Image (cartoon, rainbow, N blue to C red):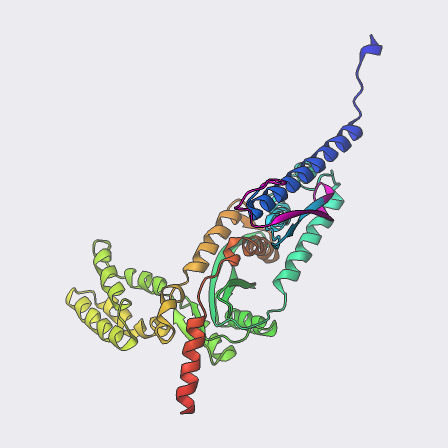
Amino acid sequence: MSDNIIQVNQEIIHTELKDLVRTSVEEALNAMLDAEADKLVNAERYARNEERKGYRSGHYERSFTTTSGEINIKMPKLKGLTFETSIIERYKRRETSVEEALIEMYLAGVSVRRVEDISEALWGTKVSPGTISNLNKKAYAHIEEWRNRKLTGEYPYVFVDGIFLKRCWGGEFENCSVLIAIGVNKDGYREILGAYEGLKEDLESWKNLFVWLKSRGLSGVKMITGDKALGMTEAIGQVFPDAKYQRCTVHFYRNVFSVVPKQKVKEVAKMLKAIHAQEDREAALQKAASVAEKLRGMRLTKAAQKVKESISETLTYMSFPSEHWTRIRTNNTLERLNKEIKRKTKVVGTFPDDQSALMLVCARLRHVASSEWGSKRYLNMEHLASMLISQEEELAS
């Protein structure tokens, strides 16, 4: 009877499965590369037709390391065309999310045994608790290196905001904030400039953020858009004195709505939007005065006062090309990032410390930065360059 018992060697099975996955990944990527090459030349290999744009000329091999092991990639060679592919980069980006997943598992309180199982699926090998800890430290190091990378070139437009998370400190729960900055470079692409730990949104925290960004090379800043958080405008003046401040119009609207009865919010919203629909700053200021007067007539004195006192700082964007107005007068591009971060951090609930919160936020930001978010041009900066040249010529004359 014992002779009929089948003995399973788990090590052999694991090795075979790993080899199977590696082979599958290799075959899939090579097939995708060949299909992309066929599409470029507008013909299958060896096919002859009048619409052909180029010719296949064999392959050259390169090694590529994946979580399943090293694979051999056969890159198509073309005659008459340059073969460029985004397939490998997309695969790399997919694997960078492993770091974020590991940190997220740790902070979400997943058991070490469960992390071992999941790590095996992610890295292709089962790791010990000690190795998991080392991998976590390695992920932290990679993220910290990215967070402190050198900033090169100029960033005319900068957007800043803070996100509040909960931490446990000495057995008590309290809020901590992570301050986030993104920029639009001189070529018009968005880039995440950095995330910085701040106990709260105050002058010291904002100044520390701006000093840190400047020390890493942030320059050429023409305008900084943000909510009117405590100390922000003062910090901008101290660290970037040549930069103008734009108060986010969406946050401004919300601030006015806070003193408006719910049944009148829609009407007031139309009035406020009419201010920012004007063709220039002077016309907008005149419209704002008219709106404030109308609000007083509606017995919305506090709302009228807010418009009168704050409207000017919401019109800074009008000193820049009109083609950029809708995208530089609000923090909407950052608000979307914040929603994505909150979605990810919600599963954690309360962080054990500020560093953990900062690392998970940065892991998510790093992942977003490698996606289409940062690869699509956000603004045509030729409009700004032309405006600056015209201003210089006027000053010279």
Q: Is residue 76 visible?
A: yes
The residue closer to the viewer here, 146 or 67, is 67
Residue 231 in view:
no
Name which residue lies at 41% across and 62% down: 331
Residue 233 as seen in the image, left or right of residue 239: left
Kindly identify the residue that appears in the image at 51 percent across and 65 percent down: 181
Q: Percent position (x, y) of residue 353?
A: 60, 55
Q: Can you say which quadrant of the picture contains the N terminus?
A: top right
Q: On the picture, is 161 further left or further right than 130?
A: left
Residue placed furthest toward the bottom: 397
Instruction: Report which quarter residue 318 is drawn in.
Output: bottom left
325 w.r.t. 90: above or below: below
- Magenta extent: 44-72
Q: Does the magenta-highlighted stretch encompass residue 292?
A: no
Direction from residue 147 to residue 248 in the image, left or right: left
Up-down: is 71 above or below 222?
above
Residue 161 coordinates in the image, percent (x, y): 46, 63
Q: Position of residue 151 (x, y in %)?
A: 59, 69
Q: In the figure, residue 245 lies in which quadrant?
A: bottom left
Residue 52 included in the magenta stretch of the image: yes
**Residue 273 higher or lower than 368, as above or below:** below
From the top left corner, tell me how far across and down residue 5 is, in percent.
Answer: 80, 13
Which residue is pictured at 24% across the width and 57% down the height? 265
Numbered circles on residues, count: 0
